[in-house]
Image (cartoon, helix red, strand yellow):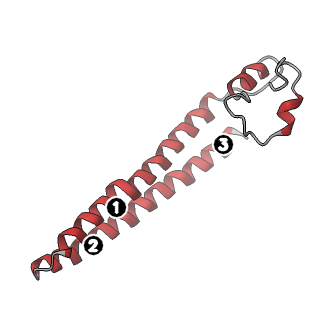
Amino acid sequence: MEPEQVHDAVEDLFDIESEVDTAAAEIKDETSTVGSALTGSNFAVGEALTSAGTWWHGMRAGGFGRRLGNMGEYLATCAETAVEIDEYNADDFRRHADLVRYADRPNAQVEAYPSNPRGGL
């Protein structure tokens, strides 16, 4: 994959990260408004609703958004520091993605690499 394609994907991830945060903030604000009204009317569920909206924004949706952002940052770094696989470094790539660690790798072609006496990489 060309670095520019990776950067395009990173932009998409950052856009989704922003959309998730915006949507979660709206949910938090709306539940807070309803929660405050219910609390003011002496309904016990009001505080719980406000707390749930705050938790959802910060932890659930926020955690998902942060993962998207982290993945984007990682991929952007990979795009800038990428090393192409060639005959000189192919063994390094195979060693880092060995079949012992990634035993369920669904790539039959990996078994065909002759450089590993274990039959894998």
Q: Give the residue displayed 74% in from the left and 39% down from the top.
A: 105
Tell me the SS state at disc 3. helix
Q: Are marks 3 and 2 in contact (CB under 8 Å)?
A: no
Going from N to C along the chain, the mark reached first, 3 or 2, is 3
The tag earlier along the polypeptide, 3 or 1, is 3
Residue 96 pos. (x, y %): 68, 25
Which residue shows up at 33% across the image and 64% down it?
A: 25
Compared with 110, 1 (above or below) is below
Above/below status of 6 relative to 86: below
- Judging by the rendered image, the residue that carries numbered circle 2 is 31
Say which residue label 3 marks. Answer: 4
**Label located before the other in sequence (1 or 2):** 2
Per the image, label 1 sits on a secondary structure element best described as helix
- Expressed as whole percent of the image width and height from the top left, the position of residue 60 reads 39, 57
Q: Residues within 10 Å of mark 3 (few under 14, many from 20)?
A: few
- Distance, label 1 to label 2, CA atoms, is 10 Å
Mark number displayed over residue 56: 1
Measured in 3D between alpha carbons, the distance from the residue under mark 3 to the one under mark 2, in whole angstroms, is 41 Å
Where residue 120 appears, as percent x and y from the top left, is 81, 26
Q: Residues within 10 Å of mark 2 (few under 14, many from 20)?
A: many
Q: Amino acid at mark 1?
A: Trp
Residue at 10% over, 79% down:
40
- Residue closer to the observer: 96 or 78: 96
